Image (spheres, rainbow, N blue to C red):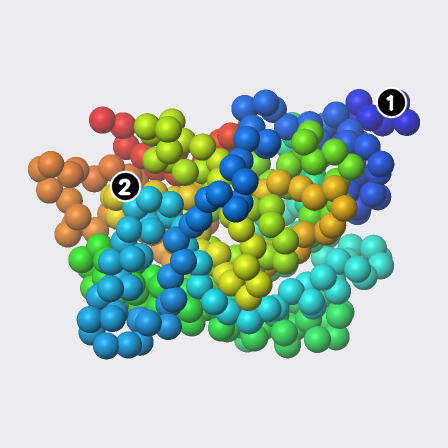
Amino acid sequence: MENEKGASSSTFKMGNSAQERSLPYVPHCYAVPPSYEPRDALDSKSESVPTIDISRLKGSDDERRGVIQEIRLACQSFGFFQSILDDALAVAKGFFELPAKEKNKFMSNDVYAPVRYTTSLKDGVDKTQFWRIFLKHYAHPLHRWIHLWPQNPPEYREKIGKFCEEVRILSLEIMGAITESLGLGRDYLSSRMGENGMQVMAVNCYPPCPDPKTALGLPPHSDYSCITILLQNLTGLEIFDLTAHDGSGRWVHVPEVKGVLKVHIGDHVEVLSNGLYKSVIHKVTLNEEKTRISLASLHSLGMDDKMSVPCQLVNDENPVRYRESSFNDFLGFLVKNDISQGDRFIDTLRIKD
């Protein structure tokens, strides 16, 4: 046991990781660097995040304008807000309760695979491992991918498929509001995201961790997507408030409210806004007693469709600050880099002065 505690990440292969085996200790390869600051978040009761009722977008012109302004402020300050949707977690939990033999049918370390089950980030490759098990699969267009999804639990395809369809409709509403708040009009990206856009589902399981102060479920990162819509059954999500402490920032617990979705602003909205809106940096902390389940629906342009800074947002005072990129470019970045050590896709896109 002592030898295993100090083992390198390559010791824990897919299907046999420490979190899957419910080890009563945290092996050294799961110990995150001190720079991640996993214990410095504020108490969730003392901090609030923007909450916006997206249904008001369908109201009167004045009401819609008010929502657009709320979204503008939320994007500029947190890159994060909440909206209400029904619970869709039970079937995801059921998948992770299946026997290993059933889950391992989808096991893959290939980031290009349209359906893959794995643990941590890149098993046996990244320097630090993370206390997570996840199933990731493409979801749009649904008819193209759903036959590749798990057939067990029997209702998985039906219930997760319905969730994907509903949050996709919501994502288009939100993106229309975001582009409108930038002065680009609500239909600026509608055809590119509506017909040919990508939707990737990350179905996550964070088992109980014997020492939550040592490990993390996910390291600090931002999502490559335009937006990510997240549903969770327990607290554990923390976001980095860039505006706190005179710009030095601080971590903030996101409180859990039943039936509420979290919406993250991703790297490609930061590019789209030419830096006016920032992609939200977030991480996942762990629970010593309970399993956390989350459904993250990532929405972006098509696989090879490049997001670039609109000419409308460029002038002599505001030159282009980001290179164009696609979802496929992000996958290439993921293969070559180790985000467990702080590498961020958005950093490769910023044009230095």
- Please state which of residues 133 and 252 is positioned toward the viewer in this rendering: 252
Residue 10, visible in the rendered structure: no
Image spot of residue 119 (x, y percent): 70, 45
Q: Which residue is mark 1?
A: 3
- The foreground one among 276 and 127 is 276
The residue under the point 60% across, 50% down is 235
- Residue 83: x and y in percent read 44, 63
Residue type, mark 1 in image: Asn
Residue at 18% from the left image edge and 57% from the top image edge: 183
Relative side of 167 to 271, left or right? right
178 to 120, vertically: above or below: below
Residue 127: tell me if it is visible: yes
Residue 337 relative to residue 207: left or right: left
Q: Quadrant of residue 341?
A: top right
Residue toward you, 120 or 237:
237
Residues packed near mark 2 inside 10 Å, few (<14), some (14 to 19) or many (20 plus): some
Q: Say whether disc 1 or disc 2 marks the residue closer to the N-terminus.
A: 1
Look at 34% across and 29% down and name the residue there. 247
Give the vertical position of 301 relative to 267 (above or below): below
Q: Quadrant of residue 127?
A: top right
Circle 1 packing at 10 Å, graded few (<14), some (14-19), many (20+), is: few
Q: CA distance from mark 1 to mark 2?
A: 47 Å
Mark 2 = which residue? 275
Task: Pick the quarter of the image with the C terminus.
Answer: top left
Look at label 2 and name its amino acid: Gly
